[in-house]
Amino acid sequence: MANFTPASALIGGALIGISATLLLWLTGRLAGVSGIMHGALLQRRDGWRWLFLVGLVAGAGAWLWLSPQAFAQRAGYPVPLVLLAGVLVGFGTAQGGGCTSGHGVCGISRLSIRSIAATITFLLTGMISVFVVRHLFGVAS
Amino acid sequence: MRHAAARNASALLAGLIFGLGLAISQMVNPKKVLDFLDVSGNWDPSLLLVMGGAVGVAMLAFRFVIGRGQPLFASEFHLPRMTKVDRRVLIGSGVFGLGWGIGGYCPGPGIAALSAGSTDALVFVAGMVLGSLLYRRLAAPRA
C-alpha cells in the first residue's frame, strides 16, 4: 500500500461532497456525472448540464495548472482498450442510471437500496475486469 | 423560467469544485483507480477514502438541504423515482464496472482528465458518447 494517499483522498472526496450538496441545494439536481452527460447529449438547449461539465474540466485544469506534477498522465495504454472502456461505461451508466458519483456518492448518501446494489455491482465487475486485463492478459497500466 | 441564470452559475460552480476534488484526490489518474480495483495486486485504498469523504459530507448535508423542502433557485428537487433493485440497474452497473476496470476512468474523472489534453482521456470520452448513443438507439425502453 505504498501508493496510498489518505489525506488528498479525503480532502478531494470532501470537495466532491460539498459540490454535490451545493448543486442539490441551489438547483435541486443530483451531481451524477453520467446522468448529467447523458442529459446534456439529449437536451442541447438545457444549459446547466453543459456548464457543470465545463466546470468539471476547468476545476481539474486549475489544479493541474497549480501543481503540474500532481497529474501523472497515462501514455501507451492500448487505444482500443480505452475506446472499449468508454463504450462500456457510456452504455452501462445509461442503462444502470448512474455511475460512481450518481449511485456511489449521491445514492449511497440518500441510503437508496438501488444505488447501494449498483455500487456493489460495479465495484465487483470492475475488480474482475482489472484482474482479467492486468493479471490474465498481462496488460501493464 | 425564474432563476435560470442563477441555476447555470450554480452548476458551473458545482462543476468547478467537483473537478478540483477529482484532481486533488488524483482520481483523474486512471492508474490510481486501477490500483484500487486491483485487490490481488499492489492495492491502493485511496478511492475508498474519496468516496468515504464525499458520502460523509453529502449524507449529513443532504438531510438539511432536502429538509428545507425546496431548492434555492428551483421549484422542486429532482430525485430519482426508481428506488427498486431491478435487472436493468444490475446489468447496466455490471457493464459500467467492466468498462471502468478496463480503462480506469468513470465518467467524472474521464471528462475532468480532458483538461490535461491527453489522447487517452479524449478516446475514452469519445467512447462514452458513443456508448450513450448506442444505448439510446438499441436498448432504451420506449417511452
Image (spheres, rainbow, N blue to C red):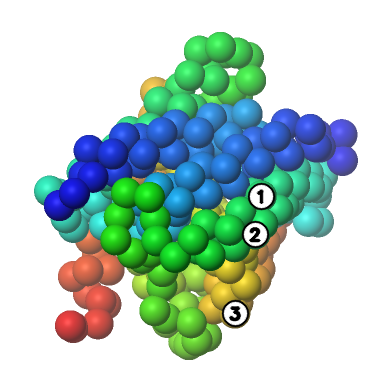
Above or below, B81 against A76 in this view is below
* Dot 3 crowding, Cα within 10 Å, few <14, some 14–19, many 20+: some
Give percent across and percent down for residue A52.
35, 40
Q: Residues within 10 Å of mark 2 (few under 14, many from 20)?
A: some
Residue A137 in sight from this viewpoint: no
- Mark 1 lies on residue: B57
Q: Which residue is found at the position 45% from the left and 51% from the top?
A: A25
Q: Chain of mark 3?
A: A
Q: Chain of mark 2?
A: B
Give the mark toward the camera: 3 or 1.
1
Query: Residue type at mark 1?
Result: Val
At label 2, which amino acid type do we have?
Met
Residue at disc 2, secondary structure: helix
Q: Which residue is mark 2?
A: B59
Tag 3: residue type?
Answer: Ile
Q: Chain of mark 1?
A: B
Q: Residue tagged by mark 3? A: A113
Where residue A116 appears, as percent x and y from the top left, is 62, 73
The spot of residue B100 in percent (x, y) is 53, 55
Which is in the foreground here, disc 2 or disc 3?
A: 2
